[in-house]
Image (cartoon, helix red, strand yellow):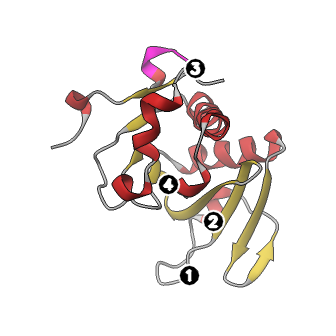
Amino acid sequence: MSELLWDDVAYFFDPDLMGLLPDVRVPDTSVEDWQAVLDLIGESGWKCQYSDGDAVLPVPRAEALLSGPAEAECPELRVWPADEVLAIFRFHAAEEIDFDVDLRELQGRERLDAFCGFLRAIGRRLGKPVLMDPEGDYGHPVLGFDVDRNTPSLTSVPSSSRST
């Protein structure tokens, strides 16, 4: 269970305010961090599906995923950390792990807890913050897993740490 109360954070999950597909990201990453996330997904038992174009394939190693030609179609990894909660990872660059979530799927306490648990697992595995920006407002996180506080909960990102 997260330490966030749905009534306190519901507005962060309002598609009309945040956009339908906010960006979730882990900044300052490496190929090794990507591989750690892929290992976590494999170990977790979360349902997942990797595709490159129309082909559904086994999940390759991170270095292979991130070494494709820049003009190639970006492969994606769909991960379901809970029923009806989908995260879509795209392998744009080693320097940042990023994925999308659909806010229509993240409504209510049960789904909030599943989402928080997913971000917490990634943040703990990497020892790095996991931030959620409103769609189209990159660099202005509204929620995130704060690894520096050494707490398993998600916390609102203080406005002083937001970019201006």
Gap in angstroms between the C-alphas marked 4 and 2:
14 Å
Label 3–label 1 contact, CB within 8 A: no
Check the picture and name the quadrant holding the C terminus.
top left
Label 4 to label 1: alpha-carbon separation? 16 Å
Whole-number angstrom distance, CA of label 2 to CA of label 3: 30 Å
**Residue 53 drawn at (x, y percent):** 66, 83
SS category of the residue bearing label 4: strand
The residue labelled by disc 1 is 73
Tell me where the magenta segment starts and ends, as one range. Answer: 148-152
- Label 1 sits on a secondary structure element that is loop
In the rendered structure, which disc, 2 or 3, sits on the residue that comes first in sequence? 2
Label at residue 65: 2
Q: Which mark is residue 98?
A: 4
The reply to whether callout 4 and callout 3 are in contact (CB within 8 Å) is no
Left or right: residue 18 versus residue 40 is left
Q: Quadrant of residue 12?
A: top left
Q: Is the magenta stretch mostly helix, strand or loop?
A: loop
